[in-house]
Image (cartoon, helix red, strand yellow):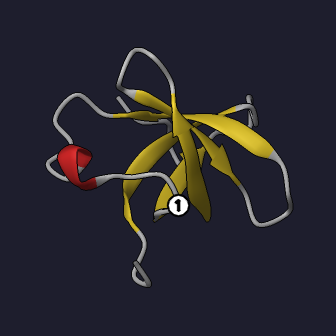
């Protein structure tokens, strides 16, 4: 279940990690986070390095994010 009131931002995908469900994503402020896909992400097969995505972070852990979908300017 997603956290209530997530912090939403955009990010750019870096290299995928070996498990195939997580990526390194770069935030606009230059920080990087581990971004993971939800179990039923219909857009999962279309993600590639360099794509802009919408990320959801919780106020408790700024090192991990959930990929909520592709950003508008892909």
**Pointer 1: residues within 10 angstroms few (<14), some, or many (20+)?**
some
Is disc 1 placed on a helix, strand or loop? loop
Res 31 visible: yes
Query: Badge 1 is on which residue?
Result: 50
Task: Determine if residue 6 is in view.
Answer: no
Q: Is residue 25 left or right of residue 66?
A: right
**Residue sitting nearer the eye, 18 or 69:** 18
Query: Residue 7 appears at what percent x and percent y?
Result: 63, 55
Q: Quadrant of residue 21?
A: top left
Give x and y (percent) for residue 47.
33, 52
Q: Is residue 32 left or right of residue 13?
A: right
Query: Where does the C terminus fall, quadrant-wise?
Result: bottom left
Quadrant of residue 58 within the rendered picture = top right
**Is 32 on the left or on the right of 19, as rendered?**
right
Q: Residue at position x 69%, y 38% from top?
A: 33
Q: Residue at x 59, y 59 (%)?
A: 12
Please say if 16 is above or below 5: above
In percent of width and height, residue 37 lies at: 36, 35
In the image, residue 38 sits, relative to residue 56, either above or below, namely above
Quarter of the view holding residue 28: bottom right
Q: Quadrant of the N terminus?
A: top left
Residue at the farthest bottom position: 73
**Residue 70: where, in percent of width, then height?**
36, 65
State how many labels appear.
1
**Residue at horizontal 73%, vertical 29%?**
61
User: Where 21 falls versus 6 (above or below)?
Assistant: above
* Residue under the point 46% across and 63% down: 51
């Amino acid at each position: 279940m997603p956290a209530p009131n997530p912090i939403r931002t955009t990010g750019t995908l870096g290299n995928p990690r070996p498990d195939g469900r997580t990526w390194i994503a770069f935030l606009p402020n230059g920080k990087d986070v581990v971004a993971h896909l939800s179990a039923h992400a219909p857009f999962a097969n279309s993600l590639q390095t360099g794509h802009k995505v919408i990320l959801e972070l919780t106020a408790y852990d700024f090192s991990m994010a959930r990929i909520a979908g592709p950003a508008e300017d892909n």
